[in-house]
Image: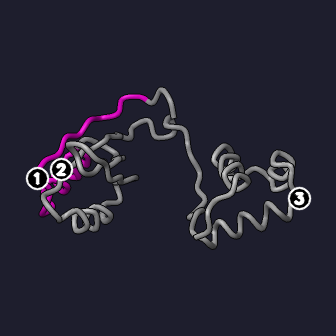
Amino acid sequence: MAALTELDRRLLAALREDGRMPLAELARRLGVARATVTARIDRLTADGVIVGFTVQVRDETELDAIRAMSLIEVEGRTTDAVIRRLRGFPEITALHTTNGGWDLVAELRVANLAEFDRVLGGIRSIEGVVNSETSLLLSSVLR
């Protein structure tokens, strides 16, 4: 993967702001030709910098959804195996490694408390998970 240029960084920032921004508008904002924007997006995608395109929806569209952050402590050198198992949970919307007292942070989204309880039980039953602490997210004040 080639190093990102300043133009690449500005392009990525613009796409994070609005992933559906027309190529002509991106080119105007960046002060380059439309063909340059197209070539950069194609290169960033081919290099694996851009790994996909998605849509973000307002939290209000899923009023009944339960969202949570689960901090997970892993035993010894089992982190890779635990991550492989956690990737199998469709309720985990993001998974991060971290430093400090916790090894992993999992973002969860479930439909109801019974599903929440089932997912937590599944996480805690994974061999190598020695401790977890989970907090429900009540509202998002900054995204």
Query: Residue shown at 19%/40% (left/top)?
Result: 133
Q: Is residue 101 left or right of residue 10?
A: left
What amino acid is labelled 3 in the image?
Ala
Give the spatial CA distance, label 2 vs label 3: 49 Å
Query: Residue shown at 18%/57% (left/top)?
Result: 122
What amino acid is labelled 2 in the image?
Glu
Along the line of sight, which residue is nearer the eye, 81 or 66?
A: 81
What amino acid is labelled 1 in the image?
Val
- Return the residue at label 1: 130
Which secondary structure, mark 1?
strand
**Proximity of marks 1 and 2: CB atoms separated by less than 8 Å:** yes
Query: Residue shown at 28%/47% (left/top)?
Result: 99
**Quadrant containing the N terminus in the rendered view:** bottom right
Which secondary structure, mark 2?
strand
Along the line of sight, which residue is nearer the eye, 95 or 63?
A: 95
Residue range in magenta is 114-139
Query: Residue shown at 32%/53% (left/top)?
Result: 97
| Residue 85 pos. (x, y %) | 25, 66
Quarter of image, res 95:
bottom left
Q: Residues within 10 Å of mark 1 (few under 14, many from 20)?
A: few
Query: Which numbered disc flags the more N-terminal residue, 1 or 2?
Result: 2
- Image depth: mark 1 or mark 3 in front: 3
Which secondary structure, mark 3?
loop
- Return the residue at label 3: 33
- Return the residue at label 2: 73
Query: Which numbered disc flags the more N-terminal residue, 1 or 3?
Result: 3
| Residue 138 pos. (x, y %) | 36, 29
